[in-house]
Amino acid sequence: MVRSPHRPTRCRSSSRFAALLVSLVVLHPFTGHAVPSDTIAIGRSLPLTGPIASYGAAKRDGADAYIHKVNNAGGVAGRQIKLATLDDAYEPQKAISNLRRLAAEDQRPRINPVPFSGSSASL
């Protein structure tokens, strides 16, 4: 089976996510936010309801499984990852509101917009 060079594989996606986690650990001391030192807080807004709810649920479930695996293996540099998820229902204004709320609650918003979406265009 030949894979398209334009489609990310699961391995590439995991590598990108791992790189994001490492960068959060490295950059965390410079953010000025008060998060417990034994926790890495990450927040995200996904379309869990609305016209592409199944896509949002798949993204949520995949990331949750990987976070669970990382946390069970000792976390990142000994720190556990706390992942908060908010539903934007595939609506741009809700996505913006969710990311602002996450930032206000010290949940480092992770902007990984849904491709071809009105929500990603608003970010």
Image (cartoon, rainbow, N blue to C red):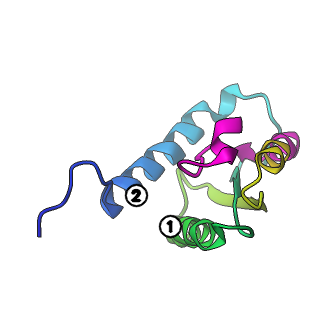
Q: What SS does tag 1 mark? A: helix
Answer whether residue 110 is magenta in the image: yes
Q: Position of residue 73 (x, y in %)?
A: 48, 68
Residue for badge 2: 14
Q: Who is closer to the viewer here, 58 or 37?
A: 58
- Which amino acid, mark 1? Tyr
Residue at left 58%, top 41%?
25
Q: Quadrant of residue 11?
A: bottom left
Q: Where are the magenta residues, as a range?
A: 100-123
Q: Is residue 55 above or below residue 122?
A: below
Residue at left 40%, top 57%?
14
The reply to whether residue 110 is in sight is no
Which quarter of the rendering shows the C terminus? top right
Query: Few, some or many C-alpha atoms within 10 Å of disc 1 (few <14, some 14-19, many ≥20)?
Result: some
Residue 8, disc: none
Q: Position of residue 20 (x, y in %)?
A: 51, 44
Point out the residue furthest to the left here.
1
Mark closest to the chain's N terminus, 1 or 2? 2
Q: Quadrant of residue 71?
A: bottom right
Alpha-carbon span between mark 1 and mark 2: 8 Å
In the picture, measured across the screen, residue 4 lies left or right of residue 58, that is left
Q: Who is closer to the viewer here, 121 or 63?
A: 121
Q: Is residue 12 above or below residue 71?
A: above
Q: Are marks 1 and 2 in contact (CB under 8 Å)?
A: yes
Q: What SS does tag 2 mark? A: helix
In the picture, measured across the screen, residue 49 lies left or right of residue 24, that is right
Residue at left 27%, top 48%?
6
Q: Quadrant of residue 31?
A: top right
Q: Position of residue 53 (x, y in %)?
A: 66, 70
Q: Position of residue 86 (x, y in %)?
A: 78, 60
Residue for badge 1: 66
